[in-house]
Structure formats: structure tokens, C-alpha cells
């Protein structure tokens, strides 16, 4: 510290990032971006995936060192070499994924997070101090419960409390509501909003939900492809104008209208039970039926058995009991059955679930058909030319951005990997489609394209089971909506008549 | 926070299709030659220090190693004779590796294959030699194949680690061999070294015309080339590579992973079993404990040095065959203990495993990205 330097102002803390540029090799992740967060404001940072939001906040927090640009904290230029420096200045960050130790209590987690944990902790004294601290806070969390026993909403509150307990005055929240029900999200953000107004806290929130921006933020900064696309007061903007700034001039695929008649039952599950990796029951007596020409959505907070249910349908996990029938026939996820019933699967995290990263785009696109003509001459000899021709056609049709069909698929961005899977799974006829979080982490253009493809498959008479953690997506696409909680289906409604609060209550298990 | 990780990749994917450059296109291939090569050189360096501790000049060592392995036509033939079983046992590790399995029990399949081929030869003494040889090869391959299939089945249906089970099966194979050779199948005239009866000189595999190298080398090369074609040019190999690359992806497209595992394990074991048959029919003429000469274990080293590529197995097996062929000369000229080439093999293995961490990290091979 320079002698004679004035200490940081007390009260609300503002942070400015000026002319930030960040290059990774030849790739420019941030290009001369400016962000001004006024002290005592609730600022939203909007942008598609890959727009540079996380890179920007990582530069502010000292995880990255920007190629060019300065960070001003409380109006003064600060060299933030690492996250510790940022913490010392009162900057804190809450991550999208929890950073609590599940086997420890809330109180233990809070004390553990301090930089100066004494060798021997005087728990009686710490508890007293924690309770006094909690009394001043709007959130209430059970101090003596294990983190593994509390709900996702309470965990998120703990994460935020942890930052406040560490006396951080400027909080960066990275998509803080992605694991919460709409009710929990409103509660947490409402409380934070109150602290911004009353207690001199400043918040910078990364999000992609316009609803939350409109309801809670004062100002917004929008990034697009590493560049500043716009900023302003939320009061002066509409979701439409913000969306336009996020997407730019890019044309989005139009979603076809909902047409056609509901047909016969194509996919029927009866009393499916399945375990998770730890051997606990994850899916409990799930029965449902999906008819041709309808999209059945399954909503639920992450970790309520949806993943295991999809894995059973995809053949990646054995059901403990129960029966799956596809168009009347018992189904065991064999290649022959999938082919006979024209089944398609769009799993979440396609690179992890549906692709071989080291194999080429062309190979990955051919996974369903490689053992048939024209890919296999005589049923056994691979015909490389056919792989290439088919891949080139589908790369054009599905707008897959890849250098060549021979590029390993792991070199593609998430959206383009999902497009390649889409080309493979929806390139032919589809009678049953199972999709799980198909748009997770993708940009607008990819999301619009995937939604349009799913709707088109439904209109052609396919039975679609859509499992998603994104309620907006489910409400937009589904004909019928089910809610999954603790491995069971607890609620069903027609999507057109569904009540958001009612769905939220069931997602939270009330 | 992970969402932005894809950024640099996106940039790669959409950058204009300029000439990606030689390194960009061939960086991977160069890497597969350069890194194992460097590991080999490093291991030879350390081995040089090791012999220097015995008071020998490392430069003499390298010279005699070259002489003993590739210096003369005689040493070439010796090298190739040793390479033949190594190619076959290396395939026993390299084929399952395509499915993501680490099988290190080639030695066991070799012994069982030898035992089976000897047994069938002894019961077919009336038949013409060609029929006996064909039956021996078939018996060796089937027995070896079933042996490694045991490991595959334990993994697929009982969740037993295939590396451990295949290794332990080596000791069981050795115990079975000793049990039979010292009991039921013992030739009463073999006094000092219990052995089975001889399969008969007429039934022995001869040498490739004009050389002293037996036909096993040709079997090995055919098996390696066939394996390469199977893996990279057939539907079966494609399915195996999908399952080996990502088992979840294989399941989601409905590939029968169990069947793939069992088939590949059978082929792998059959290859090592054939090595056992070759050792009996071309070298030993009978089954005894001499067969447990470590070809199965050196084969693991060959497969790893060859990066599990069936074609690369051929030159690597010749190289390793050369190292073992030079052992005799080192003993005679430098007075080094017989086991010193095994020390070298051990050092090479450590270097090869350690060099695994270097793939994708050598800056100048990445080209522009």
C-alpha cells in the first residue's frame, strides 16, 4: 500500500472494468469491453453462452489477467493478481455450482471459509457470533444442519451468506437461480435486492433470464461475442430490446406452429424403479404414457431422478424393476429395437453422453447408420466415401460449424456438437423422441433451431418425452407437463393450463 | 463458470478454412512417433548410467546392443525370431485397448494356447503334418481366446477389473501347465525338466525359405495387419472404437457392448494363444516351463510403445526383439548379467508410461490454434 493512500471508501463499493481485452492465443474472448457497476446498485450482466460474461468476471476476480484493461474498485485502479487480492478488496463471487462441503454443517462451512481459521476452533464462541450475524441477515438458514440435508434453495442462501459473513461488499453471482425453483429464486433475489437498497451491498449478476433482470436489476450490461453490445437502465429497456442486443442480426430458426392430432400411445413406462450410482433409489414407481403427436414435459429441480430416468430409456442404466413398452413391444434399449421403432435420443451434455470426442464429426454423425448400406458395403466393410457425403450434406442442412467433416468432434463448440447429434438423431424418420436438457448451455440460434426441430418432429406425429430443468422451455414446447420430485411424478397438468406457482410448489416438494 | 470453456474451441471451429499447415495436419502423427521415441532414448540413457555403475563404458554397451540386434544377418534372424511371439502377444493388449480395456494377461493365454496345441498334436500323431499344424493353431487360438474371454466376462458381467483378473489368470495358467506337465502329460523320459512328449519332428513348423526365421513371424504380421483392418475398416471395428471411446455413447445408440467386449477379448486371447502354438511348433517341440519366458509380459510393453496401434506393433516388436536378442552378446562381451536386458525393458516401460502425460502438451506440434 502506498503511504498516504486513502483507505477504500466505506459503504457501497462500485467496480468499473475499463477497456478490458482478453486473448487466449488468437482467440479474443473480450474485446475492449467496459462495465460500470455503480455503488449500491443491482447490475445484471446478460449475454449468450460464449459471449464473454464469465471471462469478464474472472478478470475482475483475478482468476485471469486481462491482456489489456484496468479494474477500478471504489473508483481507484487496483492490480488484482489473484482471487485473494479481490477478496481483500471486498469482492466476492458465488458460483453456479455449490462450493459447500456436503458432509459438514452450515456453521462449519461458514467458519471453514474464513482465511484465518484458528488451529483450535472455539465452537461455542463461533456459534454465538454466527447467530448474532444471522440475526442481522434477511436469510435464515439452519446453522446446525448438514449441508447434504438442506434444499438447493437453502444451499444457495448459504453460499450468499458465506460471502456476507466474509464481509464482502461487492458480490458477483453467476447464474444463481439455475438450481432453484421459481419461488425460491424470487425469494433469494428479493432479499438480495433489499440488501442492495438498505445495507450498501452491490451486486453484479450473470444471468440469461430476462424475467429476473426486469424484476430485480437496476442496470444491465449486455455482451455479444466478446464485445459490448449495450448497457442501460432496466427501466428503459424491454426484454425484446435486450434480446436483440444479445443476438445481434442473427436470424433465428422459426418454430413451426403446433398442429396435428394426438395419436396412439407410443411410449409407455410402468412402475419403473432405478438406482443412482450410490445405490439409492433415484426413480421410484414412475409410470407414464406418451402418445404420438404430443410432447410430454418432465419438470423438476436437478437431481430428482430425471437423469437416471433418461439413462434407463437410453440404455445407459438398468432399471431395477418395471417395464417399458414402445409401440406395444417390450423395450430393452437394444439397437434393433431402437431402429425398428425409429427412436431418437437427444441427451444432455452430448459430448459426454452421445459422442466420441476423439472421432471425427462425420463418424459421430454416422453412429446410428454405420452398419447399414451405404456406410457398410456388404454389411461389414466401411465405405469412407459414404460417411463423407452424408456428413457434408448434414453439416450444411443443420448448420454445423466445423472446419472439415474429419475434425474431431471435441474441437467443436457445445452448440455445434448438439447440432451434430441433432443431425444424427433427427436426420431420418422419428417415431419416438426422448430429449433431456437438449439446450443446456447453448446459444440462442442453437436453442431456436433445436426447439423448432423438436416441434417439427411432434407435428410429424412423433411421441416426444422432454425432460428439462428449464421451465420456460417446458412451458413453450410441452402439450402435457409432469413434475418429478424425489424420483416420483407428483403433478400433472396440461401445459396450456399449468400454473407456475403450482408447478413451483411441486418442484419444491410441498 | 464452465460455460465459457468452449470459447477457444468455437474460434477454432469457425475460423476461415485457411491452409491449416503441415503441423496442424500431422502434429498428432508426429507426436505418436516422437514421444515414444524420446521415451526410448531416455530409457537407453538411464540404462547407460546403470551399466556405468558396473564400470562398463555405455558407448560399448550401445555398440554391442546394435551388433547383437541388427548388426549381422545372424543377429537379424535372431531378432526376428524373437519378434514373432511379441507381435502376437502385443495384440493381446492392443486389441482390448481399442475398447478401453487394459489386458495384461497375454502370458497366460500363451501358456494355455501352448498346452492346448501340444495336447491336440499328441492325440493326432496319425494325421498328416499339415492337418496337425492346422489343428494345433486352431486349438491354441480357441484355448487362448477363451482364456482372455474369462477376463472379459468377469468384467462385463461381474464388474471385476480386467487388468487384475487377466494378470491373476497368468498364475493360474502357469499352475495348470505345471500340474499337467509334471503329472498327467509328463513324458517319463524327461527327468531333469518335466516336459510333455514331443509333438514329433515332422509336425514342426519350418523356417521361412532362405532364413532361420520360423513361420511364426509371418503369422504375427498377418495377425497385426488383419487386426488393423478389422479395427479401422470394418463395421465391427467401428463399433469397438465407439464403445472404447465413450461407452455411454455406444449404449445410447444401442450397441451391444457385452458382445463387443467378449469378441475382442476372444480375438486378443486367440492371438496370444497362437503365439503359444508357434513357440511349441517352431521352437520347443513340446510343452514345459521354458514357455513361460516372459513373451506375454514383453508384449504389454510392445503394445504400449506402439500406442496400441496394431500396425505399429510390428516395428516395435522387432525393436524389442532386438533388445532381447542382444542380451547374449552383452553377457559375452561386457560380462553383464543375463537379466540386464530385462532391467532395460523395465526402464523403458517406466519411461513410456511417464511419457503418456506429454501428449497434446508439446507446443510446437500444436500448430496454429
Image (spheres, helix red, strand yellow):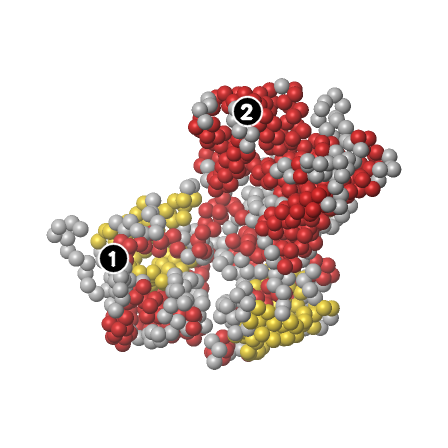
Q: At 52% from the left edge and 70% from the top edge, which residue is drawn?
A: A304
Question: Is disc 2 on the same chain as disc 1?
Answer: no
Q: Residue A435: percent from the left, percent from the top?
A: 59, 63
Q: Which of B184/A480 is in front?
A: B184
- Count residues near mark 2 (Cα–Cα under 10 Å), then give few for <14, some for 14-19, many for 20+: many
The residue that mark 2 highlights is B330
The total number of labels drawn is: 2
Give the crowd class for mark 1: few <14, some 14-19, many >=20 residues within 10 Å. few
Q: Nearer the viewer, mark 1 or mark 2?
A: 2
Q: Vertically, is A14 above or below B151?
A: below
Q: Secondary structure at mark 2?
A: helix
User: Mark 1 to mark 2: distance in Å?
Assistant: 66 Å
Q: Is residue A232 above or below residue B122?
A: below
- The chain holding disc 2 is B
Taking the image as shown, residue A52 lies to the left or right of residue B104, namely left
Residue at the spot 33% in from the left edge and 47% down from the top edge = A66
Q: Chain of mark 1?
A: A
In the image, A431 versus A382, the foreground residue is: A382
Q: At which x and y percent is residue B181?
A: 72, 42
Please tell me in which quadrant of the rendered image residue A106 appears.
bottom left
Residue position marked by numbered label 1 in the rendering: A88
For the point 48% across and 47% down, which residue is it?
Answer: B9
The residue nearer to you, when weighing A240 against B134, is B134
Apparent side of residue A246 relative to residue B125 in the rendered image (left or right): left
Viewer-nearest residue: B300 or A276:
B300
Amino acid at each position: 500500500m502506498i503511504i498516504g493512500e486513502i483507505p477504500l471508501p466505506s459503504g457501497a463499493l462500485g467496480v468499473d472494468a475499463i477497456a478490458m481485452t482478453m486473448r487466449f492465443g488468437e482467440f479474443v474472448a473480450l474485446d475492449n469491453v467496459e462495465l460500470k457497476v455503480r455503488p449500491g446498485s443491482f447490475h445484471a450482466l446478460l449475454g449468450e453462452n460464449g459471449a464473454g460474461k464469465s471471462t469478464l468476471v474472472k478478470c475482475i476476480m483475478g482468476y485471469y489477467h486481462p491482456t489489456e484493461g484496468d479494474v477500478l474498485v471504489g473508483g481507484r485502479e487496483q492490480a488484482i493478481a489473484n482471487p485473494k487480492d479481490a477478496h481483500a478488496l471486498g469482492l466476492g463471487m458465488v458460483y453456479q455450482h455449490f462450493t459447500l462441503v456436503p458432509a459438514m454443517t452450515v456453521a462449519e462451512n461458514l467458519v471453514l471459509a474464513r482465511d484465518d481459521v484458528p488451529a483450535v476452533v472455539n465452537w461455542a464462541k463461533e456459534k454465538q457470533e454466527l447467530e448474532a450475524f444471522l440475526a442481522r441477515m434477511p436469510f435464515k438458514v439452519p446453522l446446525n444442519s448438514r449441508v447434504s440435508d438442506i434444499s438447493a434453495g437453502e444451499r444457495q442462501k448459504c453460499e450468499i451468506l458465506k460471502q456476507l459473513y466474509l464481509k464482502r461488499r461487492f458480490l458477483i453471482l453467476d447464474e444463481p437461480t439455475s438450481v432453484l425453483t421459481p419461488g425460491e429464486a424470487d425469494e433469494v433475489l428479493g432479499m438480495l435486492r433489499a440488501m442492495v437498497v438498505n445495507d450498501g451491498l452491490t451486486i453484479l449478476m450473470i444471468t440469461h433470464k430476462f424475467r429476473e433482470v426486469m424484476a430485480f436489476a437496476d442496470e444491465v450490461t449486455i455482451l455479444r461475442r466478446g464485445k459490448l453490445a449495450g448497457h442501460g437502465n432496466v427501466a428503459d429497456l424491454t426484454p425484446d430490446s435486450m434480446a436483440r442486443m444479445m443476438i445481434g442480426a442473427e436470424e433465428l430458426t422459426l418454430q413451426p406452429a403446433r398442429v396435428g392430432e394426438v395419436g396412439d400411445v407410443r411410449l409407455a413406462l410402468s412402475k419403473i424403479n432405478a438406482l443412482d450410482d450410490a445405490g439409492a433409489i433415484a426413480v421410484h414407481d414412475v409410470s407414464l404414457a406418451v402418445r404420438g403427436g404430443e410432447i410430454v414435459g418432465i419438470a423438476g429441480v436437478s437431481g430428482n431422478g430425471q437423469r437416471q430416468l433418461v439413462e434407463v430409456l437410453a440404455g445407459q442404466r438398468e432399471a431395477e424393476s418395471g417395464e417399458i413398452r414402445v409401440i406395444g413391444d417390450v423395450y430393452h434399449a437394444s439397437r434393433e429395437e431402437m431402429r425398428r421403432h425409429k427412436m431418437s435420443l437427444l441427451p444432455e451434455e452430448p459430448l459426454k453422453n452421445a459422442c466420441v470426442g476423439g472421432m471425427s464429426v462425420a463418424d459421430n454423425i454416422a453412429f446410428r447408420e454405420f452398419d447399414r448400406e451405404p456406410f457398410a458395403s456388404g454389411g461389414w466393410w466401411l465405405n469412407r466415401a459414404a460417411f463423407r457425403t452424408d456428413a457434408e450434406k448434414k453439416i450444411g442442412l443443420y448448420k454445423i460449424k466445423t472446419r472439415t467433416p474429419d475434425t474431431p468432434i471435441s474441437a467443436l463448440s457445445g452448440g455445434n456438437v448438439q447440432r451434430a447429434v441433432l443431425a444424427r438423431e433427427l436426420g431420418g424418420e422419428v417415431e419416438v423422441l426422448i430429449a433431456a436438457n437438449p439446450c443446456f448451455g447453448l446459444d440462442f440460434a442453437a436453442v431456436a433451431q433445436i426447439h423448432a426441430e423438436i416441434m417439427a418432429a411432434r407435428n410429424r406425429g412423433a411421441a416426444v418425452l422432454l425432460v428439462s430443468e428449464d421451465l420456460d422451455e417446458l412451458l413453450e414446447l410441452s402439450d402435457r407437463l409432469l413434475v418429478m420430485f424425489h424420483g416420483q411424478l407428483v403433478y400433472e397438468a396440461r401445459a396450456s393450463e399449468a400454473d407456475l406457482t403450482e408447478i413451483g410448489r411441486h418442484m419444491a416438494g410441498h | 463458470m464452465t460455460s465459457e470453456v468452449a470459447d477457444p474451441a468455437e474460434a477454432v471451429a469457425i475460423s476461415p478454412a485457411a491452409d491449416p499447415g503441415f503441423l496442424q495436419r500431422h502434429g498428432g502423427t508426429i507426436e505418436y512417433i516422437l514421444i515414444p521415441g524420446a521415451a526410448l532414448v531416455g530409457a537407453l540413457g538411464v540404462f547407460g548410467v546403470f551399466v556405468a555403475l558396473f564400470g562398463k563404458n555405455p558407448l560399448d554397451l550401445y555398440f554391442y546392443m546394435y551388433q547383437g540386434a541388427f548388426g549381422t544377418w545372424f543377429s537379424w534372424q535372431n531378432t526376428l525370431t524373437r519378434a514373432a511371439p511379441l507381435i502376437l502377444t502385443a495384440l493381446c493388449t492392443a486389441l482390448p485397448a481399442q475398447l478401453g480395456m487394459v489386458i495384461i494377461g497375454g502370458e497366460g493365454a500363451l501358456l494355455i494356447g501352448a498346452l492346448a496345441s501340444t495336447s491336440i498334436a499328441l492325440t493326432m500323431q496319425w494325421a498328416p503334418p499339415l492337418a496337425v499344424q492346422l489343428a494345433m493353431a486352431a486349438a491354441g487360438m480357441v484355448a487362448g481366446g477363451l482364456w482372455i474371454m474369462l477376463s472379459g466376462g468377469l468384467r462385463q458381467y461381474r464388474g471385476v477389473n480386467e487388468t487384475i483378473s487377466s494378470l491373476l489368470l497368468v498364475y493360474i495358467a502357469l499352475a495348470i501347465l505345471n500340474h499337467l506337465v509334471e503329472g498327467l502329460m509328463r513324458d517319463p523320459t524327461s527327468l531333469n525338466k518335466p516336459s510333455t512328449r514331443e509333438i514329433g519332428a515332422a509336425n514342426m513348423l519350418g523356417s521361412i525359405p532362405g532364413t532361420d526365421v520360423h513361420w511364426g513371424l509371418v503369422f504375427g504380421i498377418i495377425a497385426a495387419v488383419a487386426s488393423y483392418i478389422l479395427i479401422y475398416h470394418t463395421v465391427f471395428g467401428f463399433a469397438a472404437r465407439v464403445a472404447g471411446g465413450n461407452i455411454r455413447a455406444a449404449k445410447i445408440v444401442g450397441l451391444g457392448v457385452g458382445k463387443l467386449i467378449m469378441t475382442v477379448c476372444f480375438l486378443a486371447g486367440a492371438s496370444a494363444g497362437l503365439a503359444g502354438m508357434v513357440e511349441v511348433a517352431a521352437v520347443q517341440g513340446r510343452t514345459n516351463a521354458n514357455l513361460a519366458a516372459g513373451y506375454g509380459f514383453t508384449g504389454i510393453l510392445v503394445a504400449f510403445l506402439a500406442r496400441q496401434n496394431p500396425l505399429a506393433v510390428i516395428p516395435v516388436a522387432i525393436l524389442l526383439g532386438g533388445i532381447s536378442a542382444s542380451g547374449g552378446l552383452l553377457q559375452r562381451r561386457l560380462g553383464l548379467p543375463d537379466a540386464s536386458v530385462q532391467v532395460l525393458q523395465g526402464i523403458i516401460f517406466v519411461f513410456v508410461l511417464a511419457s503418456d502425460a506429454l501428449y497434446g502438451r508439446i507446443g510446437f506440434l500444436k500448430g496454429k490454434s
